[in-house]
Amino acid sequence: MMIMVMNTAPVHAYHALPIPTQKSSTTLFPNYNCSSRKKSSPPRISAASVSLQTGVERTTAIHSSDLEIKERIRKLFHDVDISLSSYDTAWVAMVPAPHSSQSPLFPQCINWLLDNQLPDGSWSLPPHHHHHHPLLLKDALSSTLACVLALRRWGIGQEQVDKGIRFVELNFASASDQNQHLPVGFDIIFPGMLEYARDLNLNLQLESATVDALLLKRDQELIRFFKSYSDESKAYLAYVSEGIIKLQNWDTVMKFQRKNGSLFNSPSATAAAVMHVHNPGCLDYLHSVLEKHGNAVPTVYPLDIYPRLCLVDNLERLGICGHFRKEILSVLDDTYRCWMQGDEEIFAEKSTCAIAFTLLRKHGYNISADPLTPFLKEECFSNSLGGCLKDTSAVLELYRALEMIISQNESALVKKSLWSRSFLKEHISGGCDLKGFSNQISKQVDDILNFPSHATLQRVANRRSIEQYNLDSTKILKTSYCSSNFSNKDLLILAVKDFNHCQLIHREELKELERWVADNRLDKLKFARQKSAYCYFSAAATIFSPELSDARISWAKNGVLTTLVDDFFDVGGSLEELKKLIELVEKWDINVSDGCCSEPVQILFSALHSTIQEIGDKAFKWQARSVTNHIIKIWLDLLNSMLREAEWARNATVPTVEEYMTNGYVSFALGPIILPALYLVGPKLSEELVKDSEFHSLFKLVSTCGRLLNDVHSFERESKAGQLNALSLRLIHGGVGITEAAAVAEMKSSIEKQRRELLRLVLRKEGSVVPRACKDLFWNMSRVLHQFYVKDDGFTSEEMIELVKSIIYEPIAVNEF
């Protein structure tokens, strides 16, 4: 029979049929061994992450043993699970045997379809609480109709066919609902399946206006694609081959065949090709998928590298990668090998290529950014393709990859971030068709635009990732699919427990720091800013592992002392007092209790002396050698640079920009904060190693960034106070016509250049002598500086106060997720 259309009002609501009958377990071909037949059991779809769990489930999860949780996570590195696809299995089931068009080549797929129809008559991902996700009805319609066609094609399972037809009829209005998530190719494939249903004489009673609208839209899409016929259009039309079988140019399609025999790693597209081309490579591919997955196929195969990289990315974003260093290294080594071998699974997929590049580059693997170039063409995401390739999550991955650009010969790629940034902004404003499943991706888009990785503290980013973590692992290609590697409750549980455990340690350390301030009478220095919480925050937000307590305390105490000394040299002390402080540090072993100096000098020197000794003693345990003299020298370099600036100010000296910056990167006072902490993070550092030029380059780059950031943001305030800085000196020495805007632009360009060079040195493996754990401290400090100077010159932002509270004082409550 033909498709029957009815001029009735469309059915707007979803109707799930409470059909009590059992699913048929009929074996169509008794000579075929189906004892190993698998049923699809991917994670349940949940619209509101774990909020759908009961309190009992949450409590049980939270009290799971850490060892059990970690073991389950480790298994994900080795066994990637991906949900089976009823849609793709249906198309594979339609492939006829080579020598008998009346028999299926893969009867096991037919049996799988019979055994996996859902109670409401549909085929799709197993529903949560017996209800389809309300925004995945187009997916359910597409999968169900494909399964009905497969069964009808072989004249089998009339009961299942009738139930499937009933589901399609009752929910057909969703096919034209613009609010529904749109599977890739739906506007072409679904109308094509309706025409195939007509050819098979299926009795579908559908609303005529909706059918006409779908067919019209399909025709308009095809006209646009065939008219364009760009490489992107040809690829897309090949990808949706099963929807345009009668119109398809199969010679063109087969040009997209991959080395594994597939079309785009898509079982459905490959099955459609087999029906018309009988290509041996395509057949071998379909056999290989079924050998791997049993009696059904996933919607994409192989899918091995991407899920593993997603797992690594998740672990790093949640701040728990330290528990799985060995497994992560194994994944990255495997990925690097595949990258160097030109593996199609990486280079044929933009998301996989982007995330692989980001993680490999982040971990110091020497790879080129050239493979990203083909995916950075605007036409790959343009409106001319009707949104078919407008994949917001892929653009996110590419945008993150562009943040890892480090060399001058890659600078052209940085310009590509401009259009990708515009694309992401368009998404926020609602102008893009979202291919990702959850609106959580909107938050990710907002974050990456407002909080770039180089200006976000690691622990701040971890907390944000935990709070926004979406337990729904559903993604959408032609149909929805899931994997525990994409999203996993165990990861979230471990992340929350780990964050709160670290936070308890951090709160105790902050109390210790506050006691130290009081014991050393530092709170008696009325001229100085008291910023112990901020100084500790910058340590806890970057060096957060429990075992790095010594490094955190060193970082925080020296941060407090540099703030106090800076204020002392700026406003608190006379020139004589400044020189006296330097004299005491130079002499070092001297008693200041005999009244040889003023009280502020006595307080500062006593605190410096005891703190440097304490840090030196701790460092001896890590390094097995004394480094106290080096720490004293670091402080003397800072004090002398501050004295030079104080003398310039008192003598009204106007240095050149070069003179100012040569002194200014030291006087910015990062030396005592970063350099002593290097001795306390693990690696043994010889005296020769510490004197290597690479150490100095790292220090100079981060300090120069900090000085320039400070001077740009504090220009107005310091100008009113009559103080010179890098910006005001550029205006003084820049000649006639130089404007403040031009000078600021020049400095910002210099900041970006210095930051990228710093990142290059941090990521470099070949020719580097500085251990990565040490280099990370320089990069972490750069992130601190960019975070602090996002809006003003630090220490004053209400947002910063909230960040301090979130990292140190406010645990993540269970009911928050």
Image (cartoon, rainbow, N blue to C red):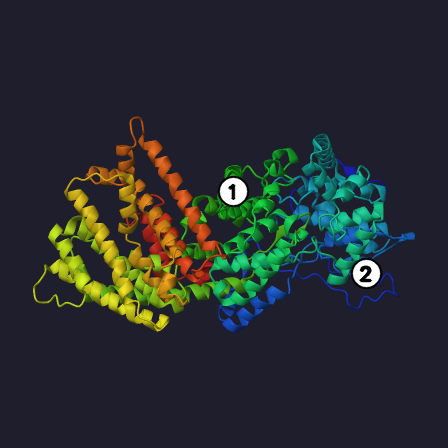
Q: Residue at x 46, y 56 (%)?
A: 467
Residue under label 2, please give it. 108
Residue type at mark 2 is Gln
Q: CA distance from mark 1 to mark 2?
A: 53 Å
Tell me: 501 left or right of 586.
right
Q: Does residue 487 show up?
A: no
Residue type at mark 1 is Asn
| Crowd around label 2: few <14 · some 14–19 · many ≥20 (10 Å) | many
Image x and y of residue 465, in percent: 47, 55
Element carrying mark 1: helix
Element carrying mark 2: helix
Image x and y of residue 236, in percent: 70, 40
Mark 1 or mark 2, whichever is nearer to me: 1
Look at the picture and state if 738 lies above or below 778: above
Q: Which label sits on residue 409?
A: 1
Q: Residue at x 77, y 62 (%)?
A: 291
Choose the circle earlier in sequence order: 1 or 2: 2
Residue situated in front as seen by the camera: 269 or 86: 269
Q: Does residue 555 show up?
A: yes
Q: Please tell me in which quadrant of the rendered image residue 499 appears.
A: bottom left
Residue at the right extreme, as displayed: 99
Is mark 1 in CB contact (under 8 Å) with mark 2?
A: no
| Crowd around label 1: few <14 · some 14–19 · many ≥20 (10 Å) | few
